[in-house]
Image: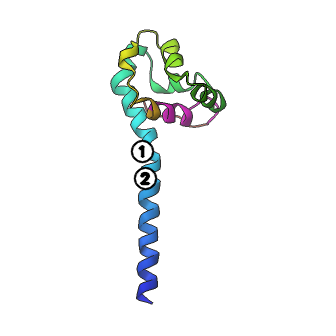
């Protein structure tokens, strides 16, 4: 009985950690946008993310044009400021708060 209880608790702990890690990208993307790009863009992340729907953001990402679209939306941001390591987090943030998602970020 105690082995079963340990397995169940270990599984619950794993799921709790896994779900926290999965949502961290969106939060990190929001923080990165606020810290690195909000001033240069001249508007908050909510306005940035709402420029496209989730399907449009996904199509842009799959076409490999996310950086280009970012610079089109925020022309004051220089390409060298758009680091490759930031882009997956910014994309997850944009997808989570797209204009058809129904979610509103707190930035």
In the picture, the disc for residue 20 is: 2
The answer to which quarter of the image holds residue 78 is top left
Q: Are marks 1 and 2 in contact (CB under 8 Å)?
A: yes
**Is 89 left, or right, of 99 in this rendering?**
left
**Is 71 left, or right, of 55 in this rendering?**
left
Label 1: state its secondary structure: helix
Direction bottom: furthest residue:
1
Which quadrant does the N terminus fall into? bottom left
66 to 24, vertically: above or below = above
The answer to which quarter of the image holds residue 12 is bottom left
Which residue is depicted at the point 64% across and 28% down?
Answer: 59
In the picture, the disc for residue 24 is: 1
In the picture, the disc for residue 97 is: none
Distance between the alpha carbons at the discs numbered 1 and 2: 6 Å
Q: What residue span does the magenta drawing correspond to?
A: 90-101
Q: Nearer the viewer, residue 94 or 45?
A: 94
Query: Where's residue 29, x and y in %?
Result: 42, 34
Query: Where's residue 102, x and y in %?
Result: 61, 36
Q: Residues within 10 Å of mark 1 (few under 14, many from 20)?
A: some
Q: Nearer the viewer, residue 15 or 49?
A: 15
Colour style of the rendered protein structure: rainbow
27 to 61, vertically: above or below = below
Q: Nearer the viewer, residue 42 or 54?
A: 54
**For residue 3: magenta?**
no
């Amino acid at each position: 009985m105690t082995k079963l209880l340990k397995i169940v608790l270990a599984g619950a702990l794993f799921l709790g950690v896994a779900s926290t890690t999965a949502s961290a990208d969106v939060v990190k993307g929001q923080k990165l946008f606020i810290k690195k790009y909000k001033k240069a863009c001249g508007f908050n992340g909510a306005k940035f993310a709402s420029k496209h729907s989730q399907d449009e953001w996904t199509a842009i990402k799959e076409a490999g044009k996310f950086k280009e679209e970012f610079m089109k939306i925020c022309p004051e941001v220089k390409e060298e400021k758009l680091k490759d390591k930031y882009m997956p987090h910014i994309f997850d943030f944009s997808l989570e708060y797209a204009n058809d998602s129904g979610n509103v970020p707190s930035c």
